[in-house]
Image (cartoon, rainbow, N blue to C red):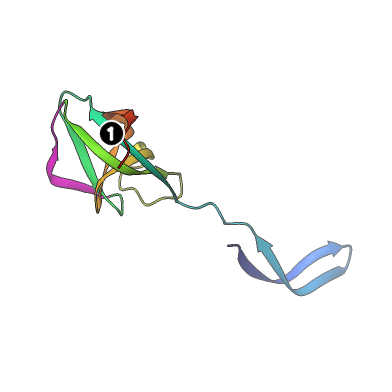
Amino acid sequence: MGDTASVTSVAKASNENINNETVSFNNSIEPLTNTDISTVILVNNPLGARLYDSEGKLVTNRRLGSWTSWYTDKKRVANKNSNVSNSIWKGVYYRVSTNEYVRAYDVVNPLYNQPR
């Protein structure tokens, strides 16, 4: 998935120009990488684990309780190009509901493999 830019004039050598050329550049780093998994994670943060929606926005009205276990079926990596609301927290997330994720920072990941 590359982008293109049109260049009107580029100096090639003394008094010689390349006109109306198209230049391509690679912009193919995916912002989010999802991996299917089947495991249980354990919240190991004494304050609980904050939740984030699928767009990376903080869910402000609740969090997962300390020392609780949760089944997860998806591991998500948010890289530098993702739209996670807080750029400090880019990294690994685990899905704990249809549209909610928890940071790997707040859990023991993964606790053990859990067939489903």
In the image, residue 72 lies at what x, y percent? 29, 41
User: Observer-nearest residue: 31 or 75?
Assistant: 75
Q: Residue furthest front?
A: 115
Q: Quadrant of the N terminus?
A: bottom right
Write the start and end of the magenta stretch as one range.
Answer: 57-66
In the image, residue 83 lies at what x, y percent? 37, 52
- Residue 18 in the image: above or below residue 56: below
Q: Left or right of 79: which side holds 96?
A: left
Q: Residue at x 81, y 71 (%)?
A: 18
User: Observer-nearest residue: 101 or 56?
Assistant: 101
In the image, residue 41 lies at what x, y percent? 27, 32
Q: Residue at x 20, y 38 (%)?
A: 50
In the image, residue 112 lies at what x, y percent? 33, 28
Q: Quadrant of the C terminus?
A: top left
User: Observer-nearest residue: 33 or 73?
Assistant: 73
Q: Residue at x 34, y 48 (%)?
A: 84
Q: Residue furthest bottom?
A: 20
Q: Main secondary structure of the magenta part?
A: strand
